[in-house]
Image (cartoon, rainbow, N blue to C red):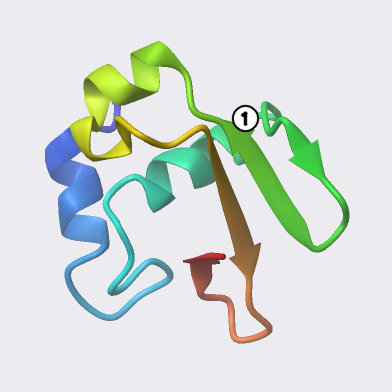
Amino acid sequence: METTIKDYEEMVKGPGKFGGEARYVPYYWEVYLAGFADGDDGRVLSFTVTREDKGIFPELKLRKAIKLYERDDGFVIEC
């Protein structure tokens, strides 16, 4: 089953690993889990925002990069 935009929106709504974050945070986490982060310094993950990403998430229109951090409590946040 492929994850949809609606799924990402639900993931950030309540408590959980992505609660309260932007809807693209779980998307980029999945990109990382698939082995496609553009950078990983052992602490912070970085991703280049592509034209395709901007098509999926219009709110990234002015962004060039996204950085994520997994806190010690397991929550993934944008930094």
Q: Residue furthest left?
A: 6
Figure check: 33 above or below 68: above
Q: Quadrant of residue 73?
A: bottom right
Q: Residue at x 55, y 33 (%)?
A: 31
Image quadrant in which the C terminus is located: bottom right
- Label 1: element kind: loop
Q: Residue at x 67, y 43 (%)?
A: 46
Residue at the spot of label 1: 34
Q: Quadrant of residue 47?
A: top right
Figure check: 20 above or below 66: below
Q: Is residue 4 visible?
A: no
Q: Is residue 32 visible?
A: yes
Figure check: 43 above or below 71: above
How far from the left and from the top, in percent, is residue 45?
70, 49
Figure check: 23 above or below 50: below
How far from the left and from the top, in percent, is residue 34?
62, 30
Q: Residue at x 33, y 66 (%)?
A: 21
Would you call the spot at circle 1 few (<14 residues within 10 Å), some (14-19), or many (20 or more)?
Answer: few
Image quadrant in which the N terminus is located: top left
Q: Nearer the viewer, residue 21 or 50?
A: 50
Image check: 60 left or right of 4? right
Image check: 40 left or right of 67? right
Task: Give the amino acid type for the residue marked by disc 1 in the picture.
Answer: Ala
